[in-house]
Image (cartoon, rainbow, N blue to C red):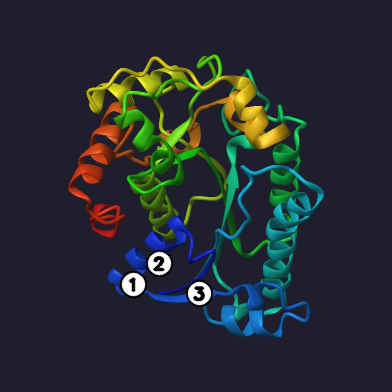
């Protein structure tokens, strides 16, 4: 199978590419030059004959939402998605990929409520607006191409940005919840994220929107307590809300508030989580950090 991947240099993209190649698949990395080719010549050439497109590209959302940052965040998702859709639609029937799998985010949902995939209660902050526009950009895809959208939660891995930022303060006993700590903490272990992508590649019945989060529902305070316990350190020093607002401005809403999200479709359609609970996820992460093993979901492909 030949699979095209955008964002293949990012944390998720690198692991997906590695697992595909080790499973004997051919990977086509979609570069920035290819994705932003207005005429679509480079993109059509890259996609021709691919069985699937995995779209992961996008500028980081957790940064100060200046005018220039907003433009980059929005265009890195909507423009690239639109170009991909146009390129796929322009290919001849025998040349089109059978699957278009696009990343999205749980930030689309309204804070303070519980959401499954049927929920239409969307938030109004900038990150939610971006996510809605991102998903809308792929709605014009050829109806003969299977479209899957993963609304992804907080990705946990030994080398994920969140764990890397928190590792030192928690190891020093200076960790704790962010803000009130009462906000939901919808997470997904990187292993399960990649396994879900393989599940979609293999399962031709999978289509539409999926919430990609673990089934356990916890809070930010639960995360801090369990992370500290595994490191044998107290986790009692909260990060004040005003500090997060000072650091990220209005983007701080992404860490100070959060929706509660349920992976109803993955569970009802037979996907099996390897790390359904935070305890299991953190035990694997802490063990790998201490052993300094490389980022990898391990036997991702063979576990499908």
- Horizontal and vertical percent for residue 112? 63, 18
Label 2 close to label 3 by CB (< 8 Å)? yes
Tell which of 105 and 195 is nearer to you. Answer: 105
Q: Which mark is residue 17?
A: 2
Mark 2 residue crowding within 10 angstroms, few (<14) / some (14–19) / many (20+): many
> Residue at (34%, 29%) from the top-left corner?
170
Residue 28 lies left or right of residue 18; in this view the side is right
Q: Is residue 277 visible?
A: no
Name the residue carrying label 1: 21
Q: Which residue is mark 3?
A: 29
Q: Residue furthest right?
A: 67
User: Residue 102 at x, y = what percent?
Assistant: 58, 55
Q: Nearer the viewer, residue 213 or 257?
A: 257
| Callouts 1 and 3 close, C-beta under 8 Å | no
Labels 1 and 2 touching (C-beta < 8 A): yes
Mark 2 → mark 3, Cα distance in angstroms: 9 Å
Left or right, residue 102 beside residue 277 = right
C-alpha gap between disc 1 and disc 3? 12 Å
Mark 1 neighbour density, 10 Å: few (under 14) some (14–19) many (20 or more):
some
Tell me the element at label 1. Answer: helix
Residue 30 locus on image (x, y percent): 56, 74
> Image quadrant of residue 40?
bottom right
Q: Which mark is residue 304?
A: none
């Amino acid at each position: 199978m030949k699979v095209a991947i955008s964002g293949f240099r990012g944390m998720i993209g690198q692991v997906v590419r590695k697992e595909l190649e080790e499973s004997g698949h051919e990977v086509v990395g979609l570069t920035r030059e290819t994705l932003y080719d207005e005429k679509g010549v480079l993109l059509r050439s890259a996609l021709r004959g691919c069985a699937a497109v995995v779209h992961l590209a996008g500028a980081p959302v957790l940064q100060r939402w200046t005018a220039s940052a907003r433009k980059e965040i929005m265009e890195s998702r909507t423009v690239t998605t639109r170009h991909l859709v146009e390129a796929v639609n322009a290919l001849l029937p025998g040349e089109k990929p059978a699957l278009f799998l696009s990343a999205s985010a749980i930030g689309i949902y309204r804070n303070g409520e519980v959401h499954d995939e049927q929920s239409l209660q969307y938030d109004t902050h900038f990150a939610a607006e971006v996510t809605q526009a991102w998903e809308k950009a792929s709605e014009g895809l050829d109806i003969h191409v299977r479209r899957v959208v993963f609304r992804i939660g907080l990705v946990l891995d030994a080398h994920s940005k969140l764990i890397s930022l928190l590792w030192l303060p928690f190891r020093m006993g200076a960790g704790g919840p962010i803000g009130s700590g009462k906000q939901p903490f919808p997470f997904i272990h990187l292993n399960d994220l990649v396994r879900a992508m393989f599940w979609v590649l293999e399962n031709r019945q999978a289509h539409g929107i999926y919430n990609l989060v673990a089934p356990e529902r916890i809070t930010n305070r639960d995360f801090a307590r369990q992370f500290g316990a595994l490191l044998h350190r107290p986790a009692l020093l909260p990060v004040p809300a005003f500090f997060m607002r000072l650091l990220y401005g209005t983007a701080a809403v992404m860490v100070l508030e959060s929706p509660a999200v349920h992976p109803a479709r993955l569970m009802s359609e037979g996907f099996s989580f390897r790390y359904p609970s935070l305890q299991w996820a953190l035990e694997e992460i802490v063990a790998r950090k201490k052993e300094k093993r490389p980022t990898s979901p391990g036997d991702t492909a063979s576990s499908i």
